[in-house]
Amino acid sequence: MFERRRETPIGPALDPSLIDRARNGDLDAFESIVRARMDAVYRLTSAILGDEADARDAAQDAFVAAWRELPRLREADRFDAWLQRVAINASRMTLRARGRRRVREIPSSHVVALAGRAAPSDAAAADAARLDVALRALSVDQRTILVLHHLDGRPLAEIAAVLEIPEGTAKSRLFYARRALEAALRDEDVER
């Protein structure tokens, strides 16, 4: 009968034939993929980097790298996990290229808006500012796993696949990232 395409955490599942055409050099097919995944890739790079300009650059770099490396992708159904891994690596490279300069504030209201939620109230804006400061204290890896789990809503098995680590390692890293965030929030409370 008719096959129903499943929904992924970053959008509707892409047609595997579209990915196959792009792997074979079809630029129009790749442009369709970019349009379908641009918001999700930007949201991920923005949450990791905390700077709009850097996030745009990293997202663009991720799509350039994806175009270059796409012929090497073996399984079309793993495209979304692969693309997220490419975006995470592009974010890391952006940080390295900037000489590991201080990661700037992550505008939570912007990230919340990108996630499709309503604009925050004054109390929520204050909480978001507090969260922004706490997130700046975390490493890129800690922010990445928190974003993948809490913002994108990915289960541990998918996070493990995206990061190419065992599921137990993903669970452990998520646990320690949460603890680090809690500690950073406590430190923020003490400073106030």
Image (cartoon, grey):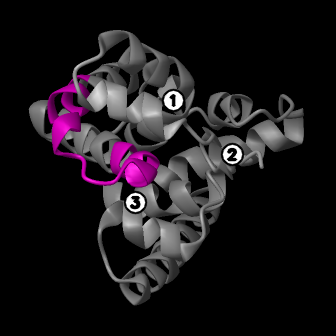
Place of residue 116 in the rendered image (x, y in percent of width and height, measured from the top left): 77, 32
* 98 inside magenta stretch: no
Q: Quadrant of residue 137?
A: bottom left
Three-letter amino acid code at disc 3?
Answer: Leu
Relative to the observer, which residue lies in front, 84 or 30?
Answer: 30
Mark 1 near mark 2, Cβ–Cβ under 8 Å?
no
Number of numbered callouts drawn: 3
Residue at x-position 64% and y-position 63%: 189
What's under tag 2, amino acid-wise? Arg
Measuring from the top left, give residue 36's x and y in whole percent.
55, 25
Report the residue marked by disc 3.
138
| Amino acid tagged 1 | Arg
The local secondary structure at tag 1 comes to helix
| Mark 3 or 2, closer to the camera | 2
The local secondary structure at tag 3 comes to: loop
Q: Quadrant of the C terminus?
A: bottom right
